[in-house]
Image (tube, rainbow, N blue to C red):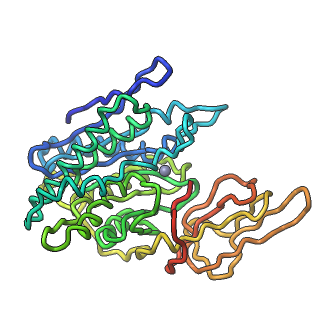
Amino acid sequence: MRTKLHALQPASAPIQRQLRSLHFGRASSGRKAYIQASLHADEVPPMLVAQHLITMLRQIDAAGLIEGEVVLVPMANPIGLSQEMQGTLCGRFDLATGINFNRHYQHLSAALIPLLEPVLSADPVHNTVRVREASLSLLSERAASPTLTETERLKLTLQTLATDADLVLDLHCDTQAVMHVYTGTPLAEAARPLAQLLGAQALLVALDSGDQPFDETVSRSWWELAAHFGPERPIPLACFAATVELRGEQQVDDALARDDALALLQFLRLKGHLAEGPALPLPALDLSSRPLCEPTPLEGVEPMVAPHHGILLFFKSPGDEVSAGEKVAEVVDPLTDQRTPLCARFAGRLFARVSRRYVSAGMRVCKVAGQQAFRSGKLLSL
Ligand SMILES: [Zn+2]
């Protein structure tokens, strides 16, 4: 295993933070998997899963069973980790700009098209190499800019580490939630075994969820370029990418984290990133159990909104099925005694809810995954 330290540009404070990436296997064979933990720095379960991944990947590497390279960033956001305010770690938004650390990555499709026009051929393997070269070149041009902020440097470094990978997993968690996974619609079938191995209860898919989250920034260009260049110059879906939400923020448990790490490595094995051999420290791959969910559109997720401020009472928990019209929660205004029910418009599964129990008007309090697409525009929460 090799450790690389990536210096982040000093901000106004006289501090230079570093990002640490761990590289298992050898880059020379061309296969590459990339996993990062806790891009939202206050989401702790992914960091613990990464600790188990380090132990397991060291063993697998020592046995010579890594195909190509596996890159692990066990803590993806050292800036967010330092944003402690009045006893609370604020790791979701960059406090300097208010921008979510998982939004506004470089979406490269438009800039790639003129670069690829003269170099693509009828060979999809050749085209994959050209797309990756051109993507890295665009990111490296941007990295040369002297005006990047520390957070922009962090985002660019993470995107550069992942952009030429065949498989990218961005590990997060929600506030109170069951395991769930986000991916691109063209990757839904490929994501089924990942969801199954993890025991995910929602698999949410979108072509473009809005505001360029990390996983889409390394996967979406592939289907957009394929559509643009057509069958004469075929471009495969060369990067599988998904955001994995490792349950709720309080579910920080060594046994759970070990199981999650095993599930992620089983998926890497299934996708050909780990070689089979008696020394592989993983149980036999078993996909015979019934999946806990089918892919559903992100446009079908109903974010239930508090109609006014007040005390929040839930009648449903993460993982519960909800019928259309069923009461999920109530908001009780202690100034007027008004009690307002929150009822689901559509049937589905409640997969995540907030942890606070006093809410303001307009706040999203929980999310229900339904089968029917009814939303459009920006599909992710803030
Ligand atoms: Zn997150």
Image height of 163 relative to 120, above or below = above
Where residue 225 sits: x, y (%)? 25, 64
268 left or right of 326 in image: left
| x 70%, y 65%: residue | 314
Q: Quadrant of residue 142?
A: top left
Question: Which quadrant holds the N terminus?
Answer: top left
Where residue 242 sits: x, y (%)? 36, 59
| x 50%, y 34%: residue | 81
Image height of 146 relative to 282, above or below = above
223 left or right of 346 in image: left
194 left or right of 173 in image: left
69 left or right of 343 in image: left
Q: Nearer the viewer, residue 192 or 285?
A: 192
Q: Quadrant of residue 282?
A: bottom left
Image height of 328 relative to 334, above or below = below
Where residue 106 sits: x, y (%)? 36, 48
